[in-house]
């Protein structure tokens, strides 16, 4: 697959999720975890994009604490392309910052936002749809990838699409009608019945100059802040200004700060085997299963056990007579819960926080 | 409680049970485990007996590999009273060996067999009933303690009692009619309906000379072997003869090798809070529970979890939405099973053995 002429992907690796505790921790957020692979979600995100561009054109925005780690994991990406946020300010500041740096050197760049902590199993389809998206974005439109829903999930935002705008690389491009917040079950079911809704993948593709002008229009405080940071970028005051300005930037997401205001957006429905790895239940779905529906990694002994996710990081996990449970072992903590309660792992983290058990966070 | 005049208890600490895996291991059998106590089952067995006698009169028979460990755990017991079996040959050889050594120095000794791996919660009652048992044994009878059944358990042997023989220290002593093997459920229910059956506690009390004459009569090969060992005991050939003779001794239990042949046995029903700690289910029963019926030890966080035994040896065990499970954490292995499947832990050990996972046995 030939690289694209002017594609500058931005990987956002700022996450600090709690739903994959005990593997995900303050110091090891989800993007640094491995699932059924020797490579981390961040490395796999990078590798998915690599045939479409060059490492020198890739950018990663992460928390300043993880800059060295990202540089180690992605040694081919130039160190200066790994940007460290002084603190997390949601996706709009992070994406705007990277886009501003890209745009000043490459005025015709198409850039895109890729969360670093998702799984995409149909990588080939992903790359092809992305080629289509970049082609559409190159015409000036703002593009998002819409995931074909497999169930009336209430944990995702939805995108409603309108009429067809055309066909690119074999994919049909639709007008983006609107974004919706996470719906309740009845609303989600209604969405699915219409056949016009996709899940919001959190992946967006734009020309960098177009994105910056949207920011200027809809989040002027962010635009002004980015201007100040850019002005100091090539001076000795770069870090000082960044640390000063960053905490004042609006804490806004790309979805709601920018995309909700866009009137000429496009959505490309994409069946790419997408999974945002939002819970251990989602992780379970990604693993191959044995004949009893168990997904097992590491040292384990399962007797009369079915439908379970059993991940050992070193110690032997011995299960007898268990059904549909999650067991995740780490060096200092072990989680045990029914798969259907996987969302409640957040409560464990909240409770650990409340009890001051910092060492487990 | 005044010590008894001539009481020489023998603690048998030779066990190598697999039902409390992963805590019980080849190198750490059940008698060396701690449950809701800083002291091991062996130490608690010793302490239960201590007010009735002196440490110098206590004997322990264990596997030769555990002799040093027993001596460390029971420093007041003279080292020469800790006897190391070259290999496990069931309870009759172990008990006979100790009784023979006791009898040659204390011809009027009353001795008794106490498994080192049981829990007894009503210690005061236990001591009182034991005083009665020793008094009865001093008259020449062979005595056993019968546990008042709380359910038609199929995991214990039963003892049928006959007419009353008298009252000692407030306890009624009955004639021992017969021992039965572990019954099926229907038989056990019938036993309970008669009101004449007790569980076999595995605790026996006899004069040492009486025990040795029973051995001579019913297990002559064992008697001859013990004679050879005793003849060499005060010579430089002690260890050599022991190692030579021991493996040839009949592999027989006290219950079936001796007690089944006894015609003038006595049984004293005793409600002493006895538990043979035969499974994690039994361990669960011994622990105090929180308001949700959970028995917890060590670092644990339980959310919406009920009726569970959760034992951590160091790492945090986080349970969400679990019901009636056993979770036992050790340095290298973690067991997870429903409480009602606790008996099947033996299958784990068997499977580990079959897979050659020696490090976990």
Image (spheres, coloured by chain):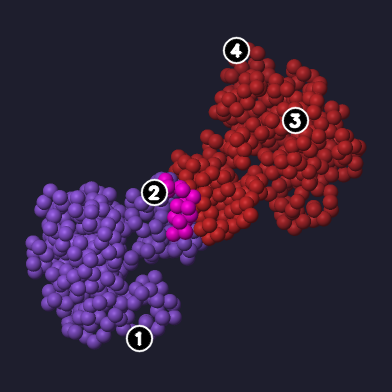
Chain colours: A red, B purple
Q: Are marks 1 and 4 in contact (CB under 8 Å)?
A: no
Q: CA distance from mark 2 to mark 3?
A: 48 Å
Q: Which residue carries the number 2 mark?
A: B313
- Say above or below: B230 vs B199: above
Q: Chain of mark 4?
A: A
Identify the secondary structure beneath mark 1. helix
Mark nearest the camera among 1 and 3 is: 1
Residue B349 image-quadrant placement: bottom left
Nearest the eye: B105 or A345: B105
A355 sits to left or right of B137: right
Q: In the image, which disc is placed on residue A112?
A: 3
B353 sits to left or right of A168: left
Disc on the earlier residue, 1 or 2: 1
Residue stretch rendered in magenta on the structure: B346-360
Residue B134 image-quadrant placement: bottom left
Q: Residues within 10 Å of mark 1 (few under 14, many from 20)?
A: few
Residue A4: give x, y in percent of width and height.
80, 25
Residue B252: give x, y in percent of width and height.
29, 66
Identify the secondary structure beneath mark 3. strand
Q: Chain of mark 3?
A: A
What residue do we see at 75% from left, 17% from top? Answer: A105
What residue do we see at 80% from left, 52% from top? Answer: A191
Q: Which residue carries the number 1 mark?
A: B194
Nearest the eye: B205 or A104: B205
């Amino acid at each position: 697959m030939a690289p694209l002429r002017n594609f500058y992907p931005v990987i956002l690796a700022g996450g600090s999720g709690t739903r994959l505790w005990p593997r995900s921790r303050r110091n090891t957020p989800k993007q640094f975890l491995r699932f059924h692979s020797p490579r981390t979600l961040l490395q796999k995100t990078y590798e998915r994009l690599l045939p479409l561009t060059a490492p020198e054109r890739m950018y990663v925005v992460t928390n300043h604490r993880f800059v060295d780690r990202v540089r180690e994991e992605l040694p081919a990406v130039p160190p200066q392309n790994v940007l460290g946020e002084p603190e997390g300010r949601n996706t709009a500041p992070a994406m705007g910052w990277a886009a501003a740096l890209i745009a000043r050197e490459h005025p015709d760049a198409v850039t895109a936002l890729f969360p670093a902590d998702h799984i995409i199993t149909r990588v080939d389809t992903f790359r092809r749809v992305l080629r289509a998206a970049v082609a559409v974005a190159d015409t000036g439109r703002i593009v998002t990838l819409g995931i074909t829903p497999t169930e009336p999930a209430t944990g995702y935002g939805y995108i409603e699409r309108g009429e067809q705008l055309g066909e690119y690389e074999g994919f049909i491009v639709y007008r983006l009608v609107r974004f919706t917040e996470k719906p309740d079950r009845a609303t989600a079911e209604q969405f699915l019945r219409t056949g016009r809704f996709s899940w919001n993948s959190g992946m967006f593709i734009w020309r960098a100059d177009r994105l910056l002008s949207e920011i200027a229009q809809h989040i002027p405080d962010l635009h002004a802040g980015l201007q100040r940071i850019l002005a100091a970028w090539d001076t000795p005051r770069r870090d000082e200004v960044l640390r000063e300005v960053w905490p004042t930037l609006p804490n806004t997401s790309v979805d709601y700060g920018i995309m909700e205001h866009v009137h000429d957006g496009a959505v490309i429905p994409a069946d790419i085997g997408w999974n945002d790895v939002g819970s251990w239940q989602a992780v379970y779905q990604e693993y191959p299963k044995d004949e009893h529906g168990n997904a097992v990694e590491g040292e384990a002994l399962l007797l009369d056990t079915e439908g379970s996710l059993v991940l050992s990081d070193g110690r032997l996990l011995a299960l007898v007579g268990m059904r549909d449970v999650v067991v995740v072992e780490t060096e200092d903590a072990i989680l045990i819960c029914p798969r259907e309660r996987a969302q409640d792992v957040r409560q464990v983290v909240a409770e650990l926080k409340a009890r001051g058990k910092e060492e487990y966070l």
